[in-house]
Amino acid sequence: MKRLLITIDGPSGAGKTTVSRRLAERLGYTYVDTGALYRAVALIALSEGCAPDDDTRLAEICRHLVLRFENSSKGPRLYATCLPVGMDGDDITERIRTPEIAMFASAVSARSVVREYLLGVQREMGKGGCVIFEGRDMGTVVFPKADIKFYLDADLDTRALRRYEELAARHAGAGLAEVREAMKKRDEDDSGRAIAPLRPANDAIRIDSMCLEIEQVVEAILLHIRAQAK
Ligand code: DC
């Protein structure tokens, strides 16, 4: 089988993470959650009191930042080094999973200094293939020549309910209406920004996950991948 580079884009709550992880397991591929990279920048900016549009300070953070994924039995973990803020290989996997960091990540992701820095990081991770990249602009900007591109979507209510149940399972406590509003705002910001907005690549295979179980989405994607890999 060819060493493919696969991209999966789509809005939050469309099921990209679970689908990408399962696909990576089935194919023996590496999985890269690019949203986590934006969340890492957001975590540092927030903890340093840096405004999400302060390009000078964001550039400074990015200049010193080294991000590394490592696989563990509990899934991929993200480690960050940024010596000026006292981070030296810190495991930030859990710390980046808060609604506040999600909103801040969306805000810093609209800044070109951040996108340019992460563009290089992501392309480096894609060298050699056998990778599944999950994000917003994987098929449009970061890997326009990816071997196969998917765009996973579902209506806002379905996605909000999924995210609400996920947060409830972690006792994160936000109400459904609050989760839905935050998701709507983030989608609008991610789709409406000037640089690398969320949108399907022209050559992406679009899958609506609203009426499908996760495993059905995985199977549908695998069919396309196997056809492509022949
Ligand atoms: O996938 P996520 O929810 O962890 O992403 C957090 C934010 O990061 C998202 O709201 C927009 C931004 N992001 C992006 O702009 N481009 C990507 N490839 C991935 C995430």
Image (tube, grey):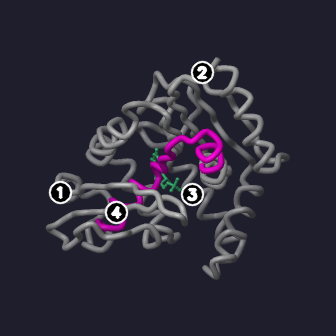
What residue does disc 1 label? Answer: 64
What residue does disc 4 label? Answer: 79
Q: Given the current orientation, which residue lies at the most extreme right position?
A: 211
Is residue 89 found left or right of 63 in the rendered image?
right
Residue at figure coordinates x 54%, y 32% from the top left:
6
| 1 or 4: tag closer to the N-terminus | 1
Count up the numbered dots: 4
Q: Secondary structure at mark 4?
A: strand
Characterize the local packing of mark 2: few (<14), some (14-19) or many (20 or more) Cα atoms within 10 angstroms. Answer: some
In this picture, is 182 found above or below 37?
Answer: below
What residue does disc 3 label? Answer: 185
The residues tagged by marks 1 and 2 sit, at their Cα atoms, a distance apart of: 36 Å
Q: Secondary structure at mark 2?
A: loop
Q: On the image, which quarter does residue 179 sit in?
A: bottom right
| 3 or 1: tag closer to the N-terminus | 1
What residue does disc 2 label? Answer: 203
Q: Secondary structure at mark 3?
A: helix
Q: Nearer the viewer, mark 2 or mark 3?
A: 2
Badge 1 amino acid: His
Does residue 39 belong to the magenta stretch? yes
Q: Nearer the viewer, mark 4 or mark 2?
A: 4
Assess whether mark 3 and mark 2 are in contact (beta carbons under 8 angstroms): no
In this picture, is 213 found above or below 84?
Answer: above
